[in-house]
Image (cartoon, rainbow, N blue to C red):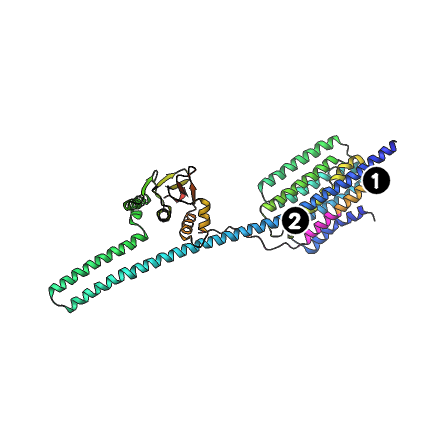
Amino acid sequence: MHIDDIARLTTLLPVIVYFSFKKKGKLLQAIVFFNTFYLVYDFLYYLIRNFDKEMGDYFNLFYVPLEYLLIYYFFRILYKSKSSLKFLNYTVLFFLTFWAVSSYFIPVSTFNSILNGLESLIVIILTLIYFYEEIKAPQSLFIYSQPQFWGVIGFFLFFAGSFFVFLYKQTYKQEELFREQYSYIHSSFFILRNLLFSIALFIRPEKVKIPNERSSFT
Amino acid sequence: MFFLQSQSLQNNTTYVVYFGTFGMLLLAVGLIVFIVFHQRKVIYYQLRMRNMQAEHQKMLIDATLNSQEEERQRIAADLHDDAGPLLATVRLYLNENLIHQDQATQLQSIYNAKQIVDDTIQLIRNISHSLIPPTLKNFGLESAMTDLIQKINGTGSINGSCRFHDYKRRLKLEAELSVFRVLQELVNNILKHSSASFLHITQNKSESYFYLRIHHDGDGLTQLEYEKMRDTPTGLGLKNIHSRIEILDGKIFFEKDSTNTYYKVTIELPITTLL
């Protein structure tokens, strides 16, 4: 079995964990929704591509913006401050505009490295904003005892790790050596992401909150 | 040659991809580790700050309670040591009236008793005035401070003055009493410790704040010294000042003039403390 197939199979892991433990929360649902979307999209792409290659390419064109919309949904639930949410909304507008423009110029059969690189960069920035919010107003005594932390670092490590292979894929897609490299690196981080998502869905959130109220002298 | 060049280019790409990915991963993991430890540090710092604040507030409450207790003890001592013997003497004179039936002695005895009752009334009035000065209650802070300064000037040891620039709207009664006590304590400290030759009290108002300032030319305190002394177990008076000002949501600043000629104490209160 090739590492790509193992990576694909691990997408099921968070979904299985979610339905086994049946934990509530919009954020956990967003993670499961994200993985389910990947499974369904991958399956449909496989079917369409077998039927008509060009149609498959057109279908694949919508994968990145839809994936980004789901990431946007995840961070939208996560963010607390208004300025972060405002920034998040701007990124969606910017990213979708960029996707529309670049899709017009780049042939559908070609992998869009700039778009994928941009998506990675935006997700990295969104993660940094989350960390900043956590430092500024901590929600819990131990950040790693919160499911959202594992969800965020799942995205963070996946996009940080895949950033370079995404950038080079458009140019070196045809090279056998690069394809192998891409496969190993991308799949490894894909597996890591799904494992981290599974931890997010498995972990029991810490109940002890930090006392927030300032006692007043009256 | 072309093949070799192409292979070298491919090797370079391989290195860039591997090192780039490894670098990004290292950065990401480093950042996560940093965040985890830093966030914990921030939380411990915040908790420590909160504990310190709570301790500080407890100390202020203790100081307030102690001063109340001291005040009660003083009143109790005044009543016991002064009013008690006076009333006992009146009782003796009245008893004498029951024994001596001779009218002249009775009249003398009643006269003496009346004198002592008058003294007792004066004594009780003094005790009551020390609790809340009647001038303050009836005419406000400006009059009470002018009264205080006049009394101080009467001693001849210091030259005092008091000027309220904008006091058409009075402070609320409780705030007025608190501010009066603070000013009284500050003036008392200046008289006791500073060897000042002049003392000047001024009042001012801005759109959102009410200010009271004391200038004097003796040895005063700077903000740092005030905070240091306030937090020592002996600085009860300064603790009281701090707690009274804090209750009013105000601030107090101790400054030294840049020319080193005088010290300045500023009390800043929010405008909401006015009636």
Instruction: Check the residue under mark 1 and report the chain it is in.
Output: A
Q: Nearer the viewer, residue B1 or A80?
A: B1
What amino acid does circle 2 point to?
Phe
In this rendering, position of residue B119 left or right of residue A80: left
**x 79%, y 49%: residue:** A6
Residue B211 percent coordinates (x, y): 39, 41
The crowd level at tag 2 (other Cα within 10 Å; few <14, some 14-19, many 20+) is many
Circle on res. B96: none
**x 82%, y 34%: residue:** B9
As for residue A46 lying within the magenta part, the answer is no
- The range drawn in magenta is A191-209
Give the labeled residue for mark 2.
A149
Residue B82 percent coordinates (x, y): 27, 60
What amino acid does circle 1 point to?
Leu
Give the labeled residue for mark 1.
A177
Q: Nearer the viewer, residue B29 or B188?
A: B188
Residue A161 percent coordinates (x, y): 73, 43
